[in-house]
Amino acid sequence: MKPWIAAFLFAVLVTSSGFFELTAAIQCSPKCEVRCSKASAKENCLKYCGICCTKCQCVPSGTYGNKDECPCYRDMKNSKGNPKCP
């Protein structure tokens, strides 16, 4: 394979992966806004919801509970073994 073709394919791969991350972040933001709308620590809620949504590609409906809708979101734990996702 010629070097310029390999470079082009690599650039496409890098660009497209960044695009998908950006798209996921855009889709997560409104869902996390709803999820965290009644949280007392809204900034922390939005932070962790965003982390969980980006990894799991889903956020449970409502402001509390319903975690069975998204098993990945439900099963993520912090270093202390507590639920990571709000």
Image (spheres, rainbow, N blue to C red):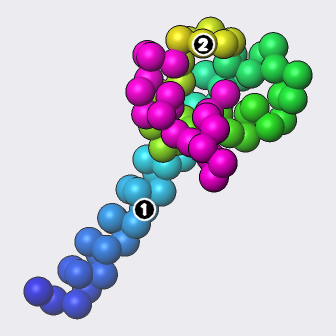
* Callout 1 secondary element: helix
Please tell me whether residue 28 is drawn above or below residue 5 in the rendered image.
above
Say which residue appears at 31% left-offset and 74% top-offset. Answer: 10
* Quarter residue 69 falls in: top left
Which of disc 2 and disc 1 is earlier in sequence?
A: 1
* Quarter residue 43 falls in: top right
Task: Give the Cα distance between marks 1 and 2.
Answer: 36 Å
Three-letter amino acid code at disc 2? Gly
Q: Residue furthest bottom?
A: 3
Q: Residues within 10 Å of mark 2 (few under 14, many from 20)?
A: few
Query: What segment is highlighted magenta in the picture?
Result: 67-86
Query: Which residue is denoted by mark 1 in the rendering?
Result: 15
Query: Which residue is denoted by mark 2 in the rendering?
Result: 65
Three-letter amino acid code at disc 1? Thr
* Quarter residue 77 falls in: top right
In the picture, which quadrant includes the N terminus? bottom left
**Which residue is nearer to you in this view: 52 or 7?**
52
Please tell me whether residue 53 is drawn above or below residue 13 in the rendered image.
above
**Which disc is residue 1 wearing?**
none
Residue 48 in the image: state x and y as whole percent: 68, 39
Say which residue appears at 87% left-offset and 29% top-offset. Answer: 41
Residue 9 in the image: state x and y as whole percent: 26, 71
Please tell me whether residue 23 is drawn above or below residue 59 in the rendered image.
below
Q: Residue furthest front?
A: 80
**Which residue is nearer to you in this view: 69 or 32?**
69
Say which residue appears at 44% left-offset and 16% top-offset. Answer: 68
**Which residue is nearer to you in this view: 23 or 78?**
78
* Callout 2 secondary element: loop
Tell me if 52 is positioned left or right of 39 in this view: left
Residue 8 in the image: state x and y as whole percent: 29, 75
In the picture, which quadrant includes the C terminus? top right
Residue 74 in the image: state x and y as whole percent: 50, 28
